[in-house]
Amino acid sequence: MNQERIPVTIITGFLGAGKTSLLNNLIRKHPEKKFAIIENEFGETGIDGGLIAAAPEAIFELNNGCICCTLGDDFIFTLENLLGSSYEFDHLLVETTGIADPSGIVDAFISGPTIQQRFRIDSVLCVADAVNMEDLFDQQPEVRKQIALADLVLLNKTDCVNPDKVLFLIRLIEGINPMARMHSTSFGSVEDIEVLNTHSFSGEAVGKSTLSFCRNDTQDDAPTKQKSFVHNPKLPEHLHKHDISSVGFTFAGSFDVNKFGVWMQNYLYFNSNTIFRAKGIMSFGQTEDQFIFHAVRSSFMFEVGKPWGNEERFSKLVFIGKNISEKELEANLLQLLVKQD
């Protein structure tokens, strides 16, 4: 009998952004849920254990190192302990340390077969500090990576800055990850924001965000010709110097499934330190259905989408990463299209 997989919300954000306040607010907002929590933070106020039933069994603290940097036995052992314990839970919250790139922990949930059987990532959430974000954005590359990997960005502490600054920071976030949902918050309050059960890693959500990116950046959305584009909002010159961007492509016709699979596996493997996330809606030759493509670092997956029917075939791909060579990437992808007779 197939067992329903437990949803996982991964919460990122730099030190002091308000992740623990968010956790406490989530627990208050959802008394119907039985949470398990893995936290890996240093020097911040802890979770209010009184909010959780059987709190000592529900909260796991990892203090032997950052799970994002040294993801290994300690983290896997904790997950196994959770699954083997008598504590029953229906949602896992993982609070990553604020000083590191969280992609390793995301990758563990989508590439580990055993973990994948029992857990599914619901979303990656980034808490951004409105007061300090502009300075951190330039000084801390981890801040930019956390935003790049997020499905939802909560711009926290907006009560402490003026409205013009909030709009400026939203544009800053969009410059890295225009596909993420964004909300302004204060004190980590999410009373009116849907944070859980968003299914952001589902094929449907990935497909919608891919189309949204393409429509935002191309006026003509018809797939009759090949297009490429870089999301690059107007910002002050010193903030254009950051190295992370979103690059998208639209191709008419279909890809050769074998060529694409082999090339993408190698491309992501050799660029695992620079490509943080990729999404796409794919047409492959000799197939009747659309395929949804989703990658985090070197791990990628496909999900069958809706049938093409009489719709004109196209493929849309979006890459978020560091120092992406748009022309080189485009030239490689063009070689993978099915040759027309």
Image (cartoon, helix red, strand yellow):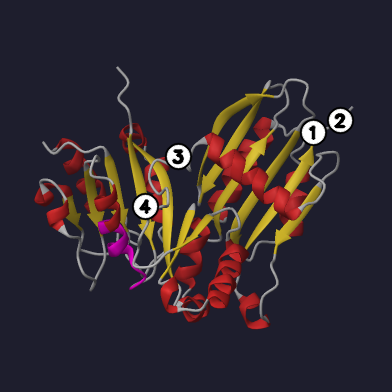
- Residue at 73 percent of width and 45 percent of height: 333
Helix, strand or loop status at disc 1: loop
Could you tell me the amino acid type at mark 3?
His
- The secondary element bearing badge 2 is classed as loop
Mark 1 and mark 2 residues within 8 Å of each other at the beta carbon? yes
Q: Main SS of the magenta segment?
A: helix
Camera-near label (3 vs 1) is: 3
Q: In the displayed orientation, state which residue is furthest to the top.
A: 1
How would you rate the neighbour count of disc 2 (Cα within 10 Å): few for under 14, some for 14-19, many for 20 or more? few
The residues bearing labels 3 and 1 have C-alpha atoms spaced at a distance of 29 Å
Q: Is residue 22 magenta?
A: yes
Which quarter of the picture shows residue 335?
top right
- Quote the CA–CA distance across marks 3 and 2: 37 Å
Mark 3 or 2 closer to N-term? 3
- Neighbour tally class for label 3: few under 14, some 14-19, many 20 plus, Cα within 10 Å: some
The 10 Å Cα crowd at callout 4, few under 14, some 14 to 19, many 20 or more, is many
Residue underneath mark 4: 10
Q: Nearer the viewer, mark 4 or mark 3?
A: 3
Query: Marks 4 and 1, how far apart in space?
Result: 36 Å
Q: Which residue has dot 3 on it? A: 199
Position of residue 339 measured from the top left corner of the image (x, y, whole percent): 83, 32
- Of residues 167 and 224, the one nearer the viewer is 167
User: Is there CB contact under 8 Å for labels 3 and 1?
Assistant: no
- Of mark 4 and mark 2, the one earlier in the sequence is 4
- Residue 227 located left or right of residue 123: right
Residue 334 located within the stretch drawn in magenta: no
| Magenta residues, start to end | 16-24
Upstream in sequence: badge 3 or badge 1 = 3
Label of residue 340 in the image: 2
In the figure, is residue 316 to the left or right of 163?
Answer: right
Please report contact status of discs 4 and 1: CB closer than 8 Å, yes or no. Answer: no
Q: Secondary structure at mark 3?
A: loop
